[in-house]
Structure formats: C-alpha cells, structure tokens
Amino acid sequence: MSRIPFTLSPDEIEFSAIRAQGAGGQNVNKVSSAIHLRFDIPASSLPELLKHRLMALNDQRITREGVVVIKAQNHRTQERNRDEALQRLHEIIEGVSVTPKTRRETRPTFSSKVRRLDGKTRRGATKAARGRVTE
C-alpha cells in the first residue's frame, strides 16, 4: 500500500473557541474551552487526488461545500481540545492518503477444484440418503 504525502499549513485551518456542552459545573458556563475546527478542502494546498477522495467520503463532518467541521470538547483546556481536533483532522486525511493495493485476479488451482467437487458429491450423497425409504 502506498501513501500520498501531505502537509497541512496552519493558515488553512481555522479555529474558534466555543463553550462546551453538557455537565461540568461552573467551568462550562464561564470558559470557552471547546474548539470548532474548520478546514476548507477545495481551497487547501492538498494534492488534487486527496481533495477528490475527501470530497467523496461519506462523512457527516464534511459539508457539501467541502468544509471539514470538527468539534472537540472532551478536555477541560482549550489547548488539549485544539490538539484533539487537529489529530482527528489528520486521521481523516491519513485515511484517504493510503492507496489500497489492487487485487490481482487469480485462478483456482486444480486440487482446489477437485476438493470442491468432492465436497459437493459427499453433500449430495448425504441428502440423497435422507429420502423416503421404499421396500
């Protein structure tokens, strides 16, 4: 499997701090620790092949316009949420950068054909033995 190398420029990624949802006491109400990451695929410096593969992904984090939106709010600090969001973006791009090895068609061997036909013959004999008994 081959990989397509890529680099992400920090100016292509847009971060915005928002307040996290859910339980957390007063900290949630006061601090904007959650991070919204936005990455515009068509405007990025990624190779064209990676752009096409990302746009073809059936991922709810990618909008129709080709913007990846990731919300990270698992940690208490903005820095750790920012790192997690970046990590998730890298995982998405890394997933499409790997080119799967193409399958080369092979033919079944003679012995595998013989084994298959022997099995079919045995199975047929077993089923024939289950028939109605006539005297």
Image (tube, grey):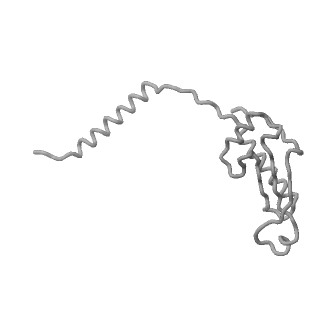
Q: Quadrant of the C terminus?
A: top left
In the displayed orientation, state which residue is furthest to the bottom. Answer: 26
Where's residue 15, x and y in %?
Answer: 86, 53
Residue 65 higher or lower than 98, as above or below: below
Residue at 64% in and 32% down? 101
Q: Position of residue 115 (x, y in %)?
A: 39, 31
Judge from the rendering whether residue 86 lies leftward or rightward of residue 122; answer left or right: right
Q: Looking at the image, which residue sits at the far front?
A: 65
Measured as percent of width and height from the top left, residue 49 is found at: 73, 34
Q: Quadrant of residue 111?
A: top left
Of 126 and 105, nearer the camera is 105
Out of 30 and 98, give the one closest to the viewer: 30
Residue lying at 80% horizontally and 47% vertically, measured from the top left: 39
**Foreground residue, 73 or 127?**
73
Looking at the rendering, in which quadrant would you find the N terminus? Answer: top right
Which residue, as the protein is rendered here, is positioned at the far right? 11
- Lateral position of residue 60 relative to residue 73, left or right: left
Number of callouts: 0
Q: Residue at x 77, y 72 (%)?
A: 23
When the figure is inspected, residue 109 is found, relative to residue 122, above or below; the finding is above
Residue 16: quadrant of the picture: bottom right
Q: Residue at x 71, y 42 (%)?
A: 55
Residue 40 lies, in percent from the top left, at: 80, 45
